[in-house]
Image: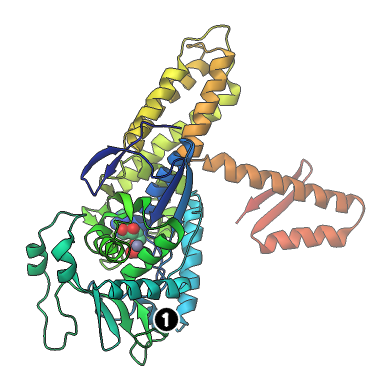
Amino acid sequence: MSSNLVIYNTLSRKKEIFEPINPPMVGLYVCGPTVYSDVHLGNCRTFVSFDLIYRYLLYSGYKVRYVRNITDAGHLEGDRDEGDDKFAKKAKLEQLEPMEIVQKYTIGFHDVLRLFNTLPPSIEPTATGHISEQIEMVKQIIANGYAYEVNGTVYFDVEKYSKNNDYTILTNRQLEDMLNNTRELGGQDEKKGRLDFALWIKAKPEHIMRWPSPWGVGFPGWHIECSAMSNKYLGHQFDIHGGGMDLAATHHTNEIAQSQACNHTNPAKYWMHTNMLTVNGARMSKSAGNGFLPRELFTGDHPLLTRGYSPMSVRFFMLQAHYRSTLDFSNEALEASDKGYRRLMNAIALLPKLKASASSEVDFEEIKQRFIAAMNDDFNSPVLIAELFEVVRIINSVYDNKTKIDAKGLAQLNTLVNDFVFNILGLKDDQTENNGDLEKLMDFIIKLRQEAKASKDYATSDLIRNSLQEMGFQLKDSKEGTVWSKS
Ligand code: AMP
Ligand code: ZN
C-alpha cells in the first residue's frame, strides 16, 4: 500500500499526507449530478477527475467505498431556497412526470459516464430514496438547537451556529463579506438570518414531489441530502468528500454546518475540489447556456468544432490537465490532445510486436517509481502523461531496433502500460476495441449466412441479410466472398 500519497485538502488549504481514518478502508463521497437535464462536459470533467482518484486509491491498495449520489429532488433555481423546483419545471416543459425526468436523465448520465470509461461507484443513493434519513437529521439539528421551523419550513440558524463554530471554515471567507453579499431580508421572508438556509421546505399546493414530515408536507433542501446519505453509508466522519469547486462556498459549507450541528464533527477529513472546465475563460454551466453536450463532442455537431472526438480522446484531454487547474475547452486543444492520445495508442499497439534481447538498456523499475511519484503528488496526471511519452519513445525505439530490452523488461513494460494507462488513467484504445469486436461479430454472422446458403436454407440467409439491412449494415456478395459496410 502506498503511504506516500499527498492530497491537497481544501480544508487546510495545503497538501497533506493521506492518512485514512481506518486503513485500508477509505470512504469517498462525491456529490453527484442533479438529474433534471443532460450533463455537460464540465460535469463530466469532475466525475472523470474523481474516477482517476478512485482508480489510483484502488491501485494503491486501499479498499474504497465510493458513494456518489443522484440529486433527484429538492433543487430550487435560486441559490438560497428561492425560485421554482427544477424537476417540476422541466417535467412541465417536457410533459412528463418528475420521476420520468429523473429516470431519463439518470440513464443519460450513466450512458455518458460509461462512454468515458468511468468505474461505477460502490453505492449510488438517491435523495428521494432517503427522505426518512433526511427528516431524522433535521429533527436532530432542531433538537440540538441549530434549526427552527416557520410555517412548515425548517431553517438552519447560521448566526447561532457561528457563535461557537466557524461557518466559513472551508473557504476562509469573512462572514461579514458574505452577509454584505446576500440580499437583505424583506417583510415576506420567514427566515431569521440572511445566511440561514432551508433544511426542509413546505410544499406549495402545486408541488408534485412531496412527503409528509413532522413539519407538514414538504420536501428536503438540497444540502441535507448529502449529509444524510454520506452519514448513512460512510459514518459520522469519513475520509474524502469531493465535488466541483463551485460547490465549496455554499453546498459543502452547509454540509459541514449540518453535520457539525447534528453529529458534532466535520463529516470529512479531506475535502477535495476539482477546478472548472471553461469555454473562452467562462465556466461551462447549464445556466450560462455554454454547456457542450458530450454527444455534440463525439459527433462534432457543434459550431465551435471542426469534427467529432472520441470519448477516449476527450478523456485524455481532461487528464492532461491537473484536476485543480482550470481547463479551457477549444477545438485546437482537443485536436492537440487527440494527436497525443493517438501517439500513445499507436505505440501501445506495437507492444505485442516487440522482440526481447539478451540484455536491457532500460530501467523500468525507475520509470515506475517516477509514475508513482507523479500520482502520489496529489494525483498529478499531466506529469504522469508527460512521463508516459518517454515510454512511447522507448517503445518506438525498441521497435526500430535502436534500443534493447530483455524479456523481464518487456514484461515490466507491459505491466506498466496495463497499470498506468488502462487501469489508472482509465484509457483504452477506441479504434481496435470497437472495430475489433464488430469485425469479429460480422465475420461470424457472415459465416452463418454462408452455411445457411450452402444448405439451401434461403429463408434464413435472407432473414440475416434483411435484418442486418434494417440495422444499417449492407452485405455485398462477390466471387471473392461477402463484404459488409455500414450506412
Ligand atoms: P450539478 O449537476 O450542476 O449539480 O453538477 C454536478 C457536478 O459537476 C458538481 O460537482 C459540479 O461542481 C460539477 N461542475 C459543474 N460545472 C462544472 C464545470 N464547468 N467544470 C467542472 N465541474 C463542473
Ligand atoms: Zn452534495
Quadrant in which the C terminus is drawn: bottom right
- Can you name the residue that lies furthest to the right here? 455
- Label 1 sits on a secondary structure element that is helix
Residue 431, image x and y in percent?
Answer: 54, 41
In the image: residue 122, left or right of residue 334: right
Residue 364, image x and y in percent?
Answer: 46, 18
78 vs 330, nearest the viewer: 78
In terms of image quadrants, where is residue 186? bottom left
- Can you name the residue that lies furthest to the bottom here? 205
The crowd level at tag 1 (other Cα within 10 Å; few <14, some 14-19, many 20+) is some
Q: Which residue is mark 1?
A: 91
Q: Residue at x 41, y 66 (%)?
A: 38
In the image: residue 471, left or right of residue 448: left
392 in relation to 333, above or below: above
| Ligand 1 located in image quadrant | bottom left
316 vs 122, nearest the viewer: 122
294 in relation to 191, above or below: above
Please, what is the three-letter code of the amino acid marked with disc 1?
Answer: Ala
263 in relation to 277, above or below: below
37 vs 9, nearest the viewer: 9
Q: Residue at x 13, y 57 (%)?
A: 173
268 vs 48, nearest the viewer: 268
Q: Residue at x 41, y 18 (%)?
A: 366
Residue 197, image x and y in percent?
Answer: 23, 73
In terms of image quadrants, where is residue 381? top left
Let me know if residue 89 appears in the view. Answer: no
Let me know if residue 225 appears in the view. Answer: yes
